[in-house]
Image (tube, helix red, strand yellow):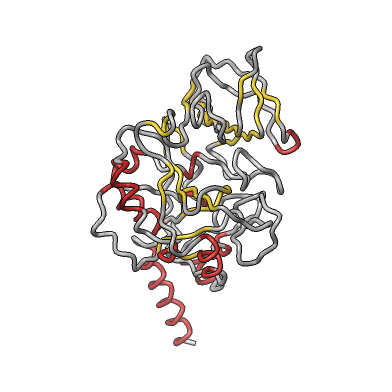
Amino acid sequence: MLHSQFHVKFRFLILSLFMIGSSQTVLSQELEGCPIFPANNVWNTRIDHLPVDPRSSDYVNSIGSDIGLHPDFGSGLWRGAPNGIPYTIVSDPIEFVSVSFDYSDESDMGPYPIPPDAAIEGGPDSTGDRHIIIVDKNTCMLYELFAAYQNPDGSWRAGSGAIFDLRSNSLRPEGWTSADAAGLPILPGLARFEEAASGEIRHALRFTCEQTRQAYVWPARHYASRSSDPTLPPMGQRFRLKSSFDTSGFSSQSKVILNALKEYGMILADNGGNWFISGCPDSGWDNDRLVNELRTVKGSDFEAVDISSLIKNPDSAEIYPFTANTAVENPKTY
């Protein structure tokens, strides 16, 4: 009996020490005074302590083990438009406008606070994804649109749209898309220059690949594929840069991104370029260094992660609480 009590207390102590400065730190992003989802949201959770997914090798090989990482953002212009996915901050007074949707049965009908000068991915003449991301800093509501175009009467039309409360962990309804194929918000997965300049990105990044499976895993809610090939990754799959990868020779901007990919990883959110990570355009990004340095980081340097132990409720992005008590009581989790 004494031996058993000692064993439990010793394990409790080890787990407590593990927590102090370890891998399960949860810190919330913030933008214009609004959290980018709560601190215990899965986007804001480190996953460097979690196990490798059993299908990791298959997923990495299907995306491309020899293909380099690519920043799908930067400074200056790309094909005549800012390079990356921009966002717009609005505050009162706001004019809300109606939006019609191609996928109306899976879209939040709004209305949406789209100002006349709203930033559009690819610019106003783009024929690409044309994402519009808007944060209302007074209400901390996030509005995201895919394939957004303005009509002559001032109203808008879009492929799909989603509205999120940045103070909530709620997910989209089961099976619903968003402005992203995985049914996830876009904003929390973007690399922002001010984060890189601060020396730390404290959240997972968004990334794409060309071929995905007709499946999704938490926290994703939607898929965009007709393939049942089990070697293809599902939407929502989390990946991380291997802990053994040496980042010492990289420039400061690249190192911040790579460290985030080790600690928080990246979430597969859409079909697109293989190993393309998303970010916001900013004049402070060093394009040459980012592109040339990150392309040396190959797919084989990543591993898929099994984050199923974090699920508290499959309909919420809130993570399963990690404390010494819960770790002892639920040894299956860690």
245 up-or-down from 190: above or below: below
Q: Is residue 166 left or right of residue 227?
A: left
Q: Is residue 40 left or right of residue 105?
A: left
Comparing 114 with 284, the one in front is 284
Q: Is residue 213 left or right of residue 298?
A: right
81 up-or-down from 324: above or below: above
Comparing 159 with 61, the one in front is 61
The residue at 43%/44% (across/down) is 28
Q: How many marks?
A: 0
Percent across and percent down for residue 173 are 70, 44
Q: Residue furthest front?
A: 79
Percent across and percent down for residue 282 are 36, 33
When asked about the image quadrant of residue 285, the answer is top left
Percent across and percent down for residue 116 are 52, 16
Comparing 72 with 166, the one in front is 72
Percent across and percent down for residue 211 are 59, 55
The residue at 46%/51% (across/down) is 204
The residue at 43%/43% (across/down) is 72
The residue at 48%/66% (across/down) is 50
Q: Is residue 211 left or right of residue 23?
A: right
Q: Residue furthest top?
A: 153
237 up-or-down from 78: above or below: below
